[in-house]
Image (cartoon, rainbow, N blue to C red):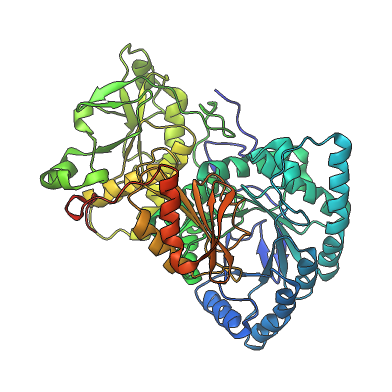
Amino acid sequence: MHRTPLHCPDPWRYARRNTRPVTVRGVGIGGANPIRVQSMITCDTMDTAACIRQTLDLASVGCELVRITAPTVKDAANLEHIARGLRERGCEVPLVADIHFKPQAAMESARWVDKVRINPGNYADSKKFDIREYTDDQYDAELERIRERFTPLVALCRERGIALRIGTNHGSLSDRIMNRYGDTPLGMVESALEFARISRDLDYHSLVFSMKSSNPKVMIQAYRLLVSRLDELGPDWNYPVHLGVTEAGDGEDARIKSAIGIGSLLADGIGDTVRVSLTEDSVREIPVAQALVEPFNRIPAGSAQGESFGDRLSFDPFSFVRRRSARLECDGIGVGGEELVRVFIPRTAHGKIAHRIDRMGDYRPEIIVENAGVHEVDPRDGLVMDALNATDHPQIVTVRDGLDLCPIRAFRLLAARLRPPHLIVLKDTLQPPVGPGADSLRTLLDASTVPGSLLCDGIGDGILVRGEEAPDRAMRLAYNILQAAGTRIFKTDYVACPSCGRTLFDLQSTTARIKAATSHLKGVKIAIMGCIVNGPGEMADADFGYVGGAPGKVNLYVGKTAVKFNIPEADAVDRLQDLIAEHGKWIGPPAPESLAGPAY
């Protein structure tokens, strides 16, 4: 058992974190303002007309802030023309400059935009992935060097009255942070705080923080640790937070991964602005972001929702440990203990697909709920919980349908009150639909957020998806949630950045080609990055990387190490396959007649 976490004053009821508002060209972030949605254009920053067109397209679908990359001083200077063109067309959407590596580009950008985003892992730092020990004096000298490079930007932002996002990314931390804290959530938080302290010393407070990762577990832990540290530092450290799962990829998998990371934090009251990163056209990010924040924007500012309980959480919110349970066998399949988290299905749904289960491949159901004798309980019922806990033989337990509890909190309460030998089956909803007409995006996001959040906290021995009524789609969704949460890897995992003006190849078509060639490789993680900025560092724990090195040229990586250079783009996918084979992870694709998975 663990104390109530500082990141969330009451884990049993919803209350949005109290933050100071930061204004960006009239758009308030934090405080009593709605949770804002934002995105990033993908064209070359020197193409003024294209930048204006893409920004207008985003604004027209409800994007509230638009980010533009500024990799060079020349690009940064062109932000003047982009901003002028937008204002002449009556578009007042705030513009955010995205900066990596070059303080000079940040300084130029700050003259023309409404907010600047810097990555403290590579702002004024040349990352070499060196392993060395820093003495305290050497570490302090590095911080002083950063202060000298960062102070002019803070002074200019304060002078112009514009905002600054300190955006840390997992895998792109400085050598200084890596060697002291490792590539960890703690390292991410400390990296941001170094820059925040400099800003505060200069009496500048228009700050927004982000802690992004392509791994939802890491992302959730980093944001929790961030707000915990901010609370510990004092009430005037209540800066707003920008949420995002970086390099989520495309399609359903990307939406699931984003919902797990962003949705679980929003459910705990963390988050003041959101960006969903998809390797798709930017306008497609906005409906997903809007759907994620909409339920929370309906809750009046300053109000709390739900019952409060005095129980301690059964998990540590800052590190992952799977909840202990006993192993049982159901339908000839092991569940609980060290077994994989299993996919459950109701008997009625199983009957609808029984005739084709042998053709469902990796998406087939494993355990019929009724056959497993699952107990449905109200975890608030002390007599029922006492009776279960007094039982010597381990039982499989879930939360009863129809309860007026938030599903995440209901299963947290069950985990807190149920003795560890007993097993828990997660549900995506306690109010399953009773007929057609459910919104497909809403269903997908809710089904991902609830069990995904709990899985990332180590809760759950099985998963049961009912929000999606079609049994075959429910099976696919259940397995994809397990994959996105890092709970059960059964297919190739892709980390793909969402594209921007730095990208050196077409990310959407390239991602599609790589998936077509490698999607049968179970358990292999491949990063697809448009440029070096999102390359060796931000690939984090990927096995192989496909990274833009120059126009028309690709570099291939094993982990964070570049091993093949300047490969013509036309040959790069084949060379990636060769590289995977060199490391013993290539298998040939299955014959067409035995391809796994149902058709949708």
Q: Residue at x 32, y 40 (%)?
A: 402
Q: Residue at x 40, y 28 (%)?
A: 379
Q: Position of residue 562 (x, y in %)?
A: 58, 52
Which image quarter holds the N terminus? top right
Q: Is residue 469 visible?
A: no
Q: Position of residue 250 (x, y in %)?
A: 43, 60
Residue 160, by quadrant, is bottom right
Number of on-image labels: 0
Q: Position of residue 10 (x, y in %)?
A: 58, 36
Q: Is residue 3 visible?
A: yes
Q: Residue furthest bottom?
A: 88
In the image, 521 versus 308, the foreground residue is 521
Which image quarter holds the C terminus? bottom left
User: In the rendered view, would you say 548 is above or below 127?
Assistant: below
Q: Position of residue 163 (x, y in %)?
A: 74, 63
Q: Residue furthest left?
A: 355
Left or right, residue 240 beside residue 358: right
Left or right, residue 398 beside residue 104: left
Left or right, residue 2 beside residue 428: right
User: In the rendered view, would you say 446 is above or below 372?
Assistant: below
